[in-house]
Image (cartoon, rainbow, N blue to C red):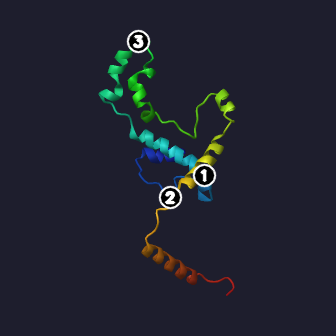
Amino acid sequence: VASLWATMLAGTDFVLHAAGWLEGGLVASYEKLAFDLEVLRQMERIRQGIAADEDELAFDAIAEAGPGALFLASPHTMARFKDSLYMSPTFLTTDFATWDAGGRQTVESRSNQAWKQLLESYVDPGLDDAVDEELRTFMVKRREEIPDDDE
């Protein structure tokens, strides 16, 4: 995660093998893939930054709430809460009692559920028939070029 953070701060838009790898690519894990995808989502949210305009800074809403008031309950906050605050489904910040009552789910178990949901929701985009044929021809040719161990 630390090296990915440096990569993100460098402004990189594409990272090959950014998710799911362990031991320098010697091992892959679906749970690690789901975990890393969540980290990437959070990094992308951070990368978007924060606007510094009148509406985002909410000076009017703060003035309306006044000293000692609960700004979190203001209409301005309520209208933006779901879009402005990223709530991770993997990295929960519940208190111990809530976590305990919820079955003590770990990051590993939530990551396991996440990759299974990804797999269930996958929609095959299809492959052009000409491209498919070209790939199959290439694979046959390569198999013929590889020496047989029995020879």
Asked if marks 1 and 3 touch (Cβ < 8 Å), the reply is no
The amino acid type, in three-letter code, at marker 2 is Val
Outermost residue toward the bottom?
Answer: 151
Residue placed furthest toward the top: 67
Q: CA distance from mark 2 to mark 3?
A: 52 Å
Q: Is residue 28 above or below residue 81?
A: below
Label placed on residue 67: 3
Quadrant housing the C terminus? bottom right
Q: Secondary structure at mark 3?
A: loop
Whether 8 is drawn above or below 126: the answer is above
The amino acid at mark 1 is Lys
Between tags 2 and 1, which lies in front? 2
- Few, some or many residues within 10 Å of mark 3 (<14, 14–19, 20+): few
For disc 2, the marked residue is: 123
Q: Secondary structure at mark 2?
A: loop
Q: Earlier in the sequence, mark 2 or mark 3?
A: 3
Under circle 1, the secondary element is: helix
> Mark 2 and 3 residues: CB-CB less than 8 Å, in contact?
no
Alpha carbons under labels 1 and 3: distance apart:
48 Å
Q: At 47% from the left edge and 77% from the top edge, which residue is drawn?
A: 133
Q: What is the distance, in whole Å, between disc 2 and disc 1 at their CAs? A: 14 Å
Between residue 3 and residue 146, name the one nearer to us: 146
Residue at x-position 47% and y-position 42% = 43
The residue lying toward the viewer, choosing from 7 and 144, is 144
The residue tagged 1 is 116
